[in-house]
Amino acid sequence: LIMACCWNSPYFTLLVLFIINLLNYADRFTLSAVLIPLESHVQDGFGYKNDLTQLQVSFLQTAFIISYMLLSPIFGYLGDRFIRKYIIGIGILFWALFTLTGSFSVNYAMLLVMRCLVGVGEASYSTVAPTMIADLFPVEKRLRMLSIFYLAIPFGSGLGYGIGAGMKSIAEKVIPPNYTHPLNEPWRYAFRFTPLLGILMAVVVLLCVKEPKRGKADGHIGKGGAAVKGQHGFKAYIKDLKYCITNPSFMLSTIGFVAVTYSTGAWAFWAPTYIVKVSSGLPPSHGLCSHKFTELEASLIFGSISVVAGILGTLTGSELSKLIGRKTKTAECIVCAISLLGAVPFIYLGLVLSQYSNCMVGVIPILFLAVFMLCLNWAPVSAIVLYVTLPEKRSTASSVNILLSHILGDAMSPFIVGWIAVSVAGSEAYGLTTGLYTTAFVCVLGGGAFLMATLTVVKDRRLVEKTKSNRKLQDSDNDCSDDDSSNNEELLHGTVHT
């Protein structure tokens, strides 16, 4: 924080990007904290005779993720070719305005459209921000700086649960009971806090953040020491996409990351509702084990799990990668595999106990360990994407990573779990439990993908380093040619003068 006080410091830019990431994830998971009010009370404001189904509510998150991932390639193209701080600043303004507008939705369709448009802002930021951090810090510092940046995910997710449940609770106490205007329902206030901070941070980005030279921190330099950047045009972009898709380590790490986003997306969206509905069906004769959790309690509990387990997991993943990295260059892939495969027994055990033990309180520590294991991934997987791709293609690589990991991951998982929940015969709690079992299976597949990446990552890193060396040699040759040309010109002028 002390180092970040100087506006020209890279730590200041890191701090600003961290805060924006925090607000993004807080907004993303605010919705999860008000799912039950949306299901049971939203008809008062939207004019429906029936409650919204779990499928309709879950599609709000799915629609946002679909919009977010489909727009990512566009911002990937822009991020490799234009000034990135302008892309981020304008995107954050879009995000804030559409989030705020969504809180005034008069029907389900309007809320759905607003959640889709929120994806415009998040796509602009999430695609470009990691590449700026890569250009601010050298390789030996980058993993730790990325881990700091990704601490915003668990902290922001937990904050989102707290903001959503807290703002709704405050609104219920402050708003007079006789003031029942549909646009003043308590759940709407959950979406009216983070946008104000988002507008402030957009101004800070546009006016105060300094744009780093693309590729400088890695020693990748263009002609005359200029920043490297992607070529313009559709054909150049297709070439960049082909480069990413044919990069084995990049594709395997992206497939592995699908498992992370699928599992975290499903649990982040459904966990508070799952805790409430499972505990509500417990017999009353088991003391503490039969405690019936309220919406606020469930949101705060899982929010706390997300914050504490997420912070510990993110920092542990970064430091474990550095420790294993002293022995092997495949360290990040190994940590990511350990993360996913290690989460499987905790997810399975937690779901089995919640289904058969009649004690939801005892399941919460097991969920903590599952979230901790999943969060080991955040910094290492981002480091893999950055160090196996060239600097002028990193925004495109990030966009492809976002597109594939979300279209197969958290864009689908809330909807799949919700679909299974309403399709399985039995109680709602049993249906949700059955749907969440899919997260354990997907984690096994993701862990296998990261183990396969250990076979290719060293070769792909060497190719990037070789390109850097060739660029330096080419730039050096150009300098020598310029010097020779200058000397010849002086000699020629001297001869003419004589």
Image (cartoon, rainbow, N blue to C red):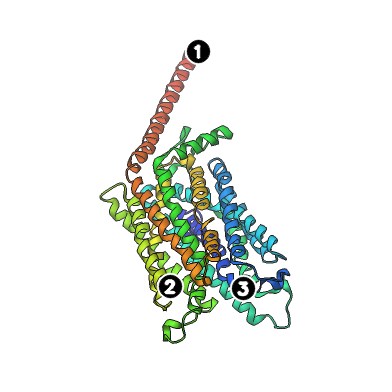
What's the residue at 43%, 48% (across, down)? 255
| 498 up-or-down from 172: above or below | above
Ranked by sequence position, the earlier of labels 1 and 3 is 3
Distance from disc 3 to disc 2, alpha carbons, whole Å, reads 25 Å
Q: Is residue 72 left or right of residue 3?
A: right
The three-letter code of the residue at mark 3 reads Pro
Mark closer to the observer (2, 1): 2
Asked where in the image residue 98 lies, by quadrant, the reply is: bottom right
Mark 3, Cα crowd under 10 Å, few <14 / some 14-19 / many 20+, is some
Quadrant placement of the N terminus:
bottom left
Please tell me in which quadrant of the rendered image residue 176 appears.
bottom right
Q: Nearer the viewer, mark 3 or mark 2?
A: 2
Tell me which numbered mark, 3 or 2, is placed earlier along the sequence.
3
- The front one of 480 and 108 is 108
Residue assigned mark 2: 355
Residue carrying label 3: 37
Residue ID for mark 1: 496
Tell which of 36 and 116 is nearer to you. 36
Q: Residue at x 51, y 69 (%)?
A: 159
CA gap, disc 1 and disc 3: 88 Å
- Label 1 or label 3, whichever lies nearer to me, is 3
Q: Secondary structure at mark 1?
A: helix
What kind of element bears circle 2?
helix
